[in-house]
Image: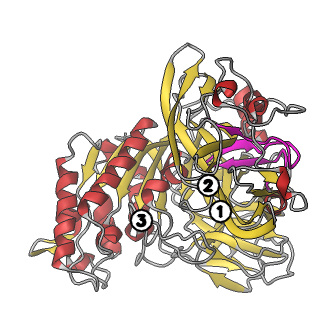
């Protein structure tokens, strides 16, 4: 843990909220004046490292008025510059994805803006937790291996895999556009830019990245991977997550205009500095935050003291591109442990839609439209209505010398706390946080809840269309955003699979998904604890076949086989000894699937705190 020193450079960086832009400059360089047209693979390959912009050899973006100026797929199609700009993806824009600041190509439409991956070596300098690419695959899905080279001469192999920009899945999309440009003009077609992230060795400094040799050149029948941007996810430094909520795939909205939202969040660990994280994931337009504040809750919408203003790069306001993220600067603020906070967001708007976490189990507060900026109100917040979800806000981080990082609770509705006490903060991750606070034998840790109701291990509930579901993308696809990009994470507790099983997914597929999650987390240096799936006999979707699948998955989990770092037997903690395929009546919320608050406490009690570190 970095020592807190108010006189040192570290605190200066925390307080001004550096975002890693220096790494972007080193990685990307400045845009070249001109580029040659796409050439042969042999011509593009070079052992000498160069900035990404110097390697641009394809034109993938065109103005709607001049659609023939670009051809990304060999058949004359391209991204619309106007659609990108409408989403906030303007030339030179800094866009944060999965915690990684990236620079969108600062070039005019109709000029080279991406490199077709074919073994080129890109100069990318810096250190951090991961490397993120913004890519598009054309003429089909692509997959290939490349090489990371560190300044000490060591190398690391990585793999990029990506679905087609038009027909591929939406679960890793960074942004989806409504149109593409064709030789005959703009046509309606949902096309995607996606992100792919690979783990770095955080103890080393990256020198260069050799791209996969996937294709000689784009063409009507030749799949190609186009790389538009690459950046390094900064290490978390002293920050630890104290609260989080995973964005599912639903969108909520009004429109909202000149409205203030005041949302309630329950902390795990406390700290002396605070920042918030905002996410505009899955949205179809930028969102502007005009003013954000944080306060300790007294009761309801009333703050215990004057709310503190949060800034973004020194500015009170921030505009988040569609699909992007924003993190506030760190500010001195006493964050109590196990306490409700109030985060207020002023939305000048109009905001047509915003991403959200649909299950809050908590009253939140909203002014009416046109009420203006009420973020600084203490006791007279003008509540127009209450609502029960978090929108845009996905994390609160603290700096605390007492904390030894955080635990991510990763799961579905049982982790999300469905059927817990409304406004009671008695989900099992809340109960685990209190267990940690109430002891001194083991290190203090933050606990953040990344459960999504309805989530599955291997299947998406997300369709890529606004407001069509709230179960989220598959757990295997949200590891980067909801686990690895969480600040200070050291351990993840995975409890997933019941929704797959009761929808007919095979036990083998669930097991393979859990193995994939564990492997990705291990590659990032995390401990992985996996929970057995809790019983559900009596639930409306229960069948003996599904029970057999649950037992198969649980048998695999208990055997461990070196796949996980530990097992938490949630099943044994809440089942009825007289009928092991059902919840103990005292632990049953009444629907025979979700535990009661007493059941959630039993689950938290089943966790060996020694396993967390």
Magenta stretch holds residue 110: yes
The quarter of the displayed image where residue 590 is located? bottom left
In the rendered structure, find residue 459 and report the number of the disc placed on it: 3
Q: Residue at x 48, y 28 (%)?
A: 157
Q: Which residue is mark 2?
A: 396
Q: Residue furthest top?
A: 152
Q: Position of residue 45 (x, y in %)?
A: 65, 25
Q: Which residue is mark 1?
A: 393
Q: Is residue 437 above or below residue 211?
A: below
Q: Disc 2 vs disc 3: which is toward the camera? A: 3
Bounds of the magenta span? 89-117
Front residue of 75 and 372? 75
Magenta stretch holds residue 402: no
Q: Residue at x 62, y 56 (%)?
A: 165
Using a 10 Å C-alpha cutoff, classify the residue at mark 1 as few (fewer than 14 neighbours), some (14 to 19) or many (20 or more): many
The quarter of the displayed image where residue 349 is located? bottom right
- Secondary structure state at the residue bearing disc 3: loop
- Secondary structure state at the residue bearing disc 1: strand
Q: Disc 2 vs disc 1: which is toward the camera? A: 1
């Amino acid at each position: 843990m970095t020592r807190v020193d108010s006189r040192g450079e570290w605190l200066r960086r925390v307080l001004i909220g550096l975002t890693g832009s220096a790494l972007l400059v080193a990685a990307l360089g400045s845009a070249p004046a001109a580029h040659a047209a796409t050439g042969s693979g042999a011509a593009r390959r070079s052992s000498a490292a160069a900035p990404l912009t110097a390697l641009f050899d394809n034109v993938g973006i065109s103005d709607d008025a001049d659609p023939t100026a670009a051809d990304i797929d060999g058949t004359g199609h391209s991204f619309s510059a106007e659609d990108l700009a409408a989403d906030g993806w303007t030339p030179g824009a800094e866009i944060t994805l999965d915690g990684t600041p990236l620079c969108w190509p600062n070039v005019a439409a109709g000029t080279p803006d991406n490199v077709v991956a074919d073994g080129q070596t890109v100069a990318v300098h810096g250190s951090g937790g991961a490397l993120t690419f913004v890519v598009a695959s054309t003429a089909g899905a692509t997959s290939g291996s490349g090489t990371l080279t560190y300044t000490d001469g060591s190398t690391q192999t990585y793999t990029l895999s990506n679905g087609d920009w038009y027909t591929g899945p939406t679960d890793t999309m960074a942004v989806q556009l409504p149109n593409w440009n064709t030789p005959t003009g703009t046509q309606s077609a949902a096309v995607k830019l996606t992100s792919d992230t690979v783990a770095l060795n955080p103890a080393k400094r990256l020198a260069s990245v050799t791209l996969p040799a996937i294709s000689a050149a784009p063409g009507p029948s030749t799949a190609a991977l186009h790389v538009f941007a690459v950046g390094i996810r900064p290490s978390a430094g002293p920050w630890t997550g104290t609260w989080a909520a995973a964005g599912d795939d639903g969108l909520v909205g009004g429109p909202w205009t000149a409205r203030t939202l005041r949302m309630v969040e329950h902390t795990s660990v406390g700290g002396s500095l605070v920042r918030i994280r905002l996410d505009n994931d899955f949205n179809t337009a930028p969102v502007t935050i005009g003013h954000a504040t944080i306060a300790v809750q007294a009761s309801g919408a009333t703050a215990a003291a004057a709310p503190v203003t949060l800034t973004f790069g020194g500015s009170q306001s921030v505009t988040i591109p569609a699909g992007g993220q924003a993190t506030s600067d760190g500010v001195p603020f006493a964050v109590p442990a196990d306490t409700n906070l109030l985060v207020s967001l002023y939305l000048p708007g109009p905001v047509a839609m915003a991403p959200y976490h649909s299950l809050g189990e908590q009253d939140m507060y909203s002014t009416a439209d046109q009420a203006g900026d009420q973020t600084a109100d203490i006791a007279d917040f003008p509540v127009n209505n209450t609502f029960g979800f978090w929108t845009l806000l996905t994390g609160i981080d603290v700096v605390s010398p007492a904390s030894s990082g955080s635990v991510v609770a990763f799961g579905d509705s049982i982790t999300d706390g469905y059927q817990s006490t409304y406004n009671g903060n008695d989900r099992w991750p809340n109960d685990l946080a209190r267990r940690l606070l109430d002891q001194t034998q083991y290190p203090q840790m933050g606990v953040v809840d990344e459960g999504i109701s309805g989530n599955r291990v291997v299947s998406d509930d997300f369709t890529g269309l606004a407001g069509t579901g709230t179960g989220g993308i598959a757990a295997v696809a949200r590891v980067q955003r909801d686990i690895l990009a969480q600040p200070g994470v050291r351990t993840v507790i995975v409890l997933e699979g019941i929704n797959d099983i009761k929808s007919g997914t095979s036990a083998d597929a669930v097991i393979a998904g859990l193995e994939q999650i564990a492997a990705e987390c291990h590659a990032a240096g995390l401990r992985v604890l996996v929970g057995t799936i809790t019983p559900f006999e009596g639930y409306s979707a229960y069948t003996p076949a599904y029970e057999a699948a649950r037992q198969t998955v649980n048998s695999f989990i208990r055997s461990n086989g070196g796949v996980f770092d530990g097992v938490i037997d949630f099943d044994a903690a809440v089942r009825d000894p007289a009928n092991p395929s059902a919840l103990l009546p005292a632990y049953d919320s009444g629907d025979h699937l979700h535990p009661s608050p007493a059941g959630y406490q039993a689950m938290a009690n089943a966790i060996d705190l020694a396993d967390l570190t």
